Amino acid sequence: MLFGFQAGKKAATERANYRMNRIPHQVIEEIRNRCDIVEVIGTYVPLKQRGSSYYAVCPFHTEKTPSFAVNPAKQIFHCFGCGAGGDVFSFVAKHQNLSFYEAIKVLADRCGVELSHQQQTSQELARLKEREQFFAINELAADYYKQLLNKQEGALAREYLAHRRVSTQCVEKFVLGYAPSGWNHLLQYMANKGVAPQKLLQVGLIIPRSKGAGFYDRFRQRLMFPIYNAQGKVIGFGGRTLDDEQQPKYLNSPDTPLYHKGEGFYGLNWAREDIGKSGSAIIVEGYLDLITAHQYGFTNVVATLGTAITQAQVRKLRQWAKEVIIFFDSDTAGISAAARSWALFLESGLRVRVAALEAEGDPDSYLNTYGTSGFEGCIGRAVSLLDFVIEQSIVQSKQNGIEGKIEALNKILPVLASINNQVERTSYLKQLAERLNIEEGVLLQELRKVVESGRRKIDKPASISGDTSGSATQLAEKMLIQLMICYPSTQQSALSQLQAHDFTSAVYAAIFKALQEEEHDVEEVDVTALMSRLQDEAAKAFVSSVAMEHERFENAERVAIDCIQVIHRRRLKTKLSELKELHRKTKSTADTKPLYECDQLMKEMKTGNFPATIKPT
């Protein structure tokens, strides 16, 4: 997806509706004027001033060197790495995964501008209503499970929690519950509350029967853990079986409109404030690992929900943390997981250390055995992620002879190949040669093979949709739009000779159409006003990149005319092909009009005397 702009894509189709008499344009402008973009973005990412702009590590993709720029004069942002860009509304929508209206509401609340519900479209009202219904259903389910935990049916779950030494305070804090063993207890409870089965299906609480009609409860005879988003709303559930014969041991909600596997963490709503204060986040794997950690006072802990660490999770953590400490098991699976996560953390700028648990299998058991001081000592002994992968791979290789060494190298060399610093890479290679008792020259040869065959390469995304072929027409369209934004004096000739349908790129066509609505007799284009007229976030991102870079042209008017002629020539060729095809189909008739029009167009192409407009066919 272009620029990774998922939230922006979601918001794009809504933007025009809010602009057209739903939220008056002057209200949006008032919010924009009251919300300084540097101040707003600065509350989410740390900005540093360089010259007239502010820079930060981009929150939308993984990088080490800051390429995310905010221009206070133009009130726009743009990332020169991933291409994301736009105004203050775009940033909040993308960063918080909100719709355009939701972003407006967040900023309106921030600056004290009141919005009435009459300013929403019927589609948005329906979407927001359904989303709130989903949250309410999940809250209702969490309360239902919580009630059952404290009743006779929940005795087995309470015994399990007591055995795991979970305090009553933590049971309350994390809203733990119990799902009974029957097939339709929740289904019946929700029916009595007026909740339709289709809604329960959408939030993943029930499953359709494989034979015949009807549904049954997804979670049965399980200890229940509500999963919250960062804002503290229930988005899904996890359930731990209380029956040894029931599989899987842990069961999570499926992907739903609210819950997406691999995008968040369990416990982030409780931990994010302390992560922000300490600058450090501790990552564990399981629900009870996290709960026990919080119980012992380690409140900056989050859990991965049993999945491998993803790039989305790394980006999310980077909003609050500068350092990450991960608890991996010291077995083969733990080492492999560490090696996989290395690539994700490499460009994040986060300092990553690994705390290996040797005597006990998980943080929950470790804490209950060694207590707070033991856990603090374990954190203090945490090593860098790369050191952990190397050390544990070497330890295991000694148990398996030559084959073990080969297996260790297969894990370690790809990681070393990803290190750009030659001094650091050489140092690790020397250490590896000594530990494995292999000649350093041999390892260097093997490393070179890995580097040459699988060199990491980050492809810079195309700046706009349809601009990857480098054709003359596409380049002309791109350059013309750049000129119209940076040099308003070029607009008159372009607007008088072209129409939006003359552009092959939908992005450029949208910007051209928006420029038609602007005042033309101006010395400088108001890019924020221009972006407010755009529905497509890719178009907004392109405008922000042009405004930030402001490419210089010695003779802008002459270049613009050249671009216009290229675009004209392309459309004439297209029209000529269509007319030739039409003539081929009608040559058996007396209709000579297509042939005449072909002749006229060929003359126009030779002379360069192009018509003002050609209607699209």
Image: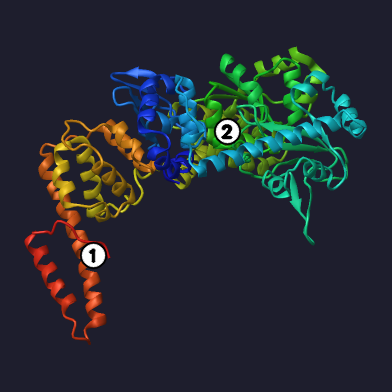
Going 62% across and 28% down the picture, which residue do you hit?
388
* Number of numbered discs overlaid on the protein picture: 2
Q: Position of residue 56 (x, y in %)?
A: 41, 24
In the image, what residue occupies the spot 25% across and 70% down?
Answer: 578
Q: In which image quadrant can residue 337 be found?
A: top right
Mark 2 or 1, closer to the camera: 1
Q: Image point 17% across, 54% down: which residue?
A: 566
Under circle 1, the secondary element is helix
Choose between 132 and 610: the one closer to the eye. Answer: 132
Q: CA distance from mark 2 to mark 1?
A: 47 Å
Q: Amino acid at mark 2?
A: Gln
Residue on which disc 1 sits: 574
The residue carrying mark 2 is 313
Question: CB of mark 2 within 8 Å of CB of mark 1?
Answer: no
Dot 2 surroundings within 10 Å: few (below 14), some, or many (20 or more)? some
Q: Secondary structure at mark 2?
A: helix
Residue 402 placement, left or right of 585: right
Tell me the amino acid under the disc marked 1. Answer: Thr
Give the x, y percent position of residue 71.
Answer: 32, 25
Up the image or down, 561 lies above or below 359; here it is below
| Residue 193 visible (yes or no) | yes
430 displayed left or right of 369: left
Residue furthest to the top: 373
Please provide percent x and percent y for residue 118: 49, 35
Residue 460 in view (yes/no): no
Label 1: how many residues lie within 10 Å, few (<14), some (14-19) or many (20+)? few
Return the disc, 2 or 1, that comes first in the chain's sequence.
2
Above or below, 54 relative to 513: above
On screen, residue 428 versus residue 391, left or right, reads left
Residue found at the very far front of the displayed protein: 118
- The image position of residue 575, as x and y in percent, is 22, 66
The residue lying toward the viewer, choosing from 379 and 69, is 69
